[in-house]
Image: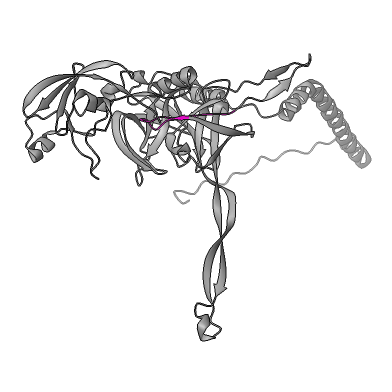
Amino acid sequence: MDLYELPKFEWPKIKKSSFNFPKFWKNQIFWIVILTVLVSSIFGFTGGVLSGLKIKLPEIQKLIENNSTSTPQYVPQTSQEEAIISAVKTFSPAVVSIVITKEVPIIEQYYYNPFPEFGQEFQIPGYRQQGTEKQEVGGGTGFIVSEDGMILTNKHVVLDTEAEYSVLTNDGKNYPAEVLARDPVQDLAVIKINQEKSVNSQGNFSLTNFPVVKLGDSDALQIGQTVIAIGNALGEFRNTVSVGVVSGLGRSITASGGGLSETIEDVIQTDAAINQGNSGGPLLNLKGEVIGINTAIVQGAQNIGFAIPINKAKRDIEQIKATGKIVYPYLGVRYVLITEKIQQDNNLSVSYGAWVTKGENGEEAVASGSAAEKAGLKENDIILEFNGEKITTDNSLSKVIQKYDAGDKVVLKILRDKEEKLIQVTLGERTE
């Protein structure tokens, strides 16, 4: 036997019984057993199914009812997300689209013979005006600050005095708008729409109040703080929402557009997407409070936008309510803020202050009839201090003047021919 070959296994032989069933009974007993087992199985399975259905039917019914109900509302995943959704839902109805329309010429093409004297049929195309038609020429954003329909927006949005303005609210209603005032210093303006009249059950007239925003405190802003921008993006997508952070504070920019070019100081920088048409829209904090007015973007940059702090606009709103116009104190000088480079290039004796000088296009340094002329200020004077405040690039003359009112008497410390002098000035009035 091979080492790995197992021995063969043989079953033991079983001795046959001497008792034998008849062949008939062998077959009958076998089929009776099979039939009994089959019938028992059928009854057992049926009883089990019915019992199971009796237990499961309420659960199945409950499952069907649950599946038939509508999908539950989305639940915000974080407190910040919840705050953003709440702010937009609460104050978005107070954000409006401003539509600019104007009579524009209708230009038609025609053909004429420039040399009729030669008697030849020679036609060339020409263009001529064939009347005018009213067309939509631009748009912007604003937000309602009073229940009677006062709206704050950018000055460059409503700068054209020959255009007509209308306001499209979030519920799709259209209202004609009147420009109440344009801020002479800031890129701000206030317009007005009229409330709708309704009749109550007693037959009396009443006015429907507009939804309003809540104004916050822009002086409390911090870099990195989350902000929400809402606006009429591209003049087409109303109440578009974008979210970002405060990227910087106290910026100074020179903005141009809509026929306006000006330097805007102390503005908020944000990376919340601000598109064309967003101008004049609100910049909100997570409480839904307006802390800025979206104003400008840097062309070619990725999400660098600027907003005017709301605290600067509060002054305009209060003046409009009180007097119907926006008034600023006015000194009446053109100046350049002195830096070390300007000092070196122009051989000046100081490295700070406001240097009174002519404009680039020859505009006079001291305006005729202004408070500065009446006080005796002259070209090439350097204003060192304004009522005791030092004038620097961070604390400009225009920023300091805005702390006062027209008619206030202030003392200027000036440098003239390397000699310091004190001059008293009664500030004038500057309006639109």
Foreground: 305 or 135?
135
Colour scheme shown? one colour
User: Is residue 142 rendered magenta in the image?
Assistant: no
Region of the chain picked out in magenta, as a range = 181-193
Q: Quadrant of residue 39?
A: top right
Is residue 133 left or right of 406 when viewed as pictured?
right
Image coordinates of residue 86 in percent, x first then y, are: 53, 23
Of all residues, the one furthest to the right in this rendering is 24
Q: Can residue 273 be seen here?
A: no
Foreground: 251 or 16?
251
Image coordinates of residue 198 in percent, x first then y, are: 72, 22
| Residue at the image position 26 percent from the left and 22 percent from the top | 400
Q: Quadrant of residue 28?
A: top right
Establish if 129 lies above or below 416.
below
| Residue at the image position 48 percent from the left and 37 percent from the top | 158
| Residue at the image position 44 percent from the left and 20 percent from the top | 319
Establish if 29 lies above or below 224.
below
Of all residues, the one furthest to the bottom in this rendering is 119
Image coordinates of residue 427 in percent, x first then y, are: 29, 21
Of all residues, the one furthest to the top in this rendering is 202
Q: Quadrant of residue 159?
A: top left
| Residue at the image position 54 percent from the left and 55 percent from the top | 105
User: In the picture, which quadrant includes the C terminus?
Assistant: top left
